[in-house]
């Protein structure tokens, strides 16, 4: 039987690395330090949204002008402090990447993180060697939920989107991958999902990979 997929494209935060809670706490702290405090629950509600739109939504929520560069610098500073203690990897992530690599399945990353923070997290978690290409916020005209990141990742791999499987945690990311024509496995992180944009919702990465036929016995 022919393999169902020729490549796998992963989201990063909340999917492969357990950084969502850490970065949300740092983000809320950065907002407070800069004079436009928001609750942690509000910051968590911005899951999967790129930083430029995140800043715009914070402005709308607080009624305070957010100086974009300064906000990112403070948020990055606080995240880097926390990363120094180690970047936690999601359960099953390393095993899945290693097994896919051993099977010579091409892997790519499609993230809404900016290039600098994405590189910092990938290097800190020692995950970068697993990927043939990494697509970040800085590489596309329109970030998630637009399909651009997934389309570019598939293009760089040289594989049609319909032959690619995506792993996502957020609604925003699942919507992007689905719009790009990929089969989507959603593994929820901080927020539950009804899977409106997913072909399968799984409790873990390994269960999702087994559903997709990536882990034969």
Image: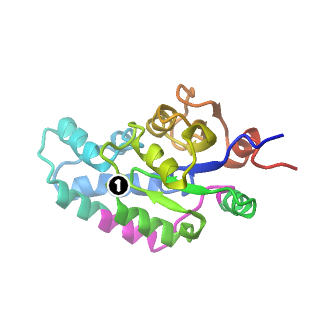
Residue 123 falls left or right of residue 71: right
In the image, farthest residue toward the bottom: 84
Q: Quadrant of the N terminus?
A: top right
* Image x and y of residue 116, in percent: 35, 66
* Image x and y of residue 175, in percent: 47, 33
Residue 66 falls left or right of residue 193: left
Whether 14 is drawn above or below 126: the answer is above
Using the rendered image of the protein, determine whether residue 62 is visible from the camera's viewpoint.
yes
Numbered disc 1: secondary structure: helix
**What residue is drawn where x is 57% and y is 28%?**
195
Please name the residue that numbered disc 1 is placed on.
139
Mark 1 Cα within 10 Å, few/some/many (few <14, many 20+)?
Answer: some
* Image x and y of residue 170, in percent: 49, 39
**What residue is drawn where x is 49% and y is 49%?**
155
The quadrant in which residue 18 appears is bottom right
* Image x and y of residue 92, in percent: 69, 56
Whether 60 is drawn above or below 109: the answer is above
Whether 18 is drawn above or below 142: the answer is below
* Range drawn in magenta: 76-93
Using the rendered image of the protein, determine whether residue 12 is visible from the camera's viewpoint.
no
Task: Between residue 50 and residue 63, name the one nearer to us.
Answer: 50
Q: Is residue 79 magenta?
A: yes
Residue 124 falls left or right of residue 202: left
**What residue is drawn where x is 38% and y is 71%?**
81
Task: Between residue 107 and residue 32, name the one nearer to us.
Answer: 107
Task: Between residue 112 and residue 202, name the one nearer to us.
Answer: 112
């Amino acid at each position: 039987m022919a393999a169902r997929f020729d490549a796998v494209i992963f989201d990063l935060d909340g999917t492969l690395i357990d950084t969502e809670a850490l970065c949300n706490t740092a983000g809320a702290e950065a907002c407070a330090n800069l004079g436009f405090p928001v609750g942690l629950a509000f910051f968590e509600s911005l899951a999967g949204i790129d930083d430029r739109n995140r800043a715009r939504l914070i402005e709308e929520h607080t009624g305070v002008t957010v100086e974009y560069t300064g906000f990112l610098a403070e948020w990055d500073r606080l995240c880097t402090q926390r990363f120094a203690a180690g970047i936690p990897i999601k359960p099953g992530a390393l095993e899945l990447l290693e097994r896919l690599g051993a099977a010579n399945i091409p892997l790519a990353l499609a993230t809404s993180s900016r290039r600098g923070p994405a590189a910092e997290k990938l290097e800190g978690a020692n995950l970068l060697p697993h990927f043939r290409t990494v697509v970040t916020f800085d590489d596309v005209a329109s970030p998630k939920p637009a399909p651009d990141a997934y389309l570019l990742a598939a293009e760089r791999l040289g594989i049609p989107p319909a032959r690619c499987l995506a792993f996502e945690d957020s609604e925003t990311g699942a919507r992007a991958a689905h719009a790009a024509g990929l089969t989507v496995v959603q593994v929820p992180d901080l927020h539950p999902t009804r899977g409106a944009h997913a072909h399968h919702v799984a409790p873990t990465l390994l269960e999702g990979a087994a559903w997709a036929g990536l882990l034969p016995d």
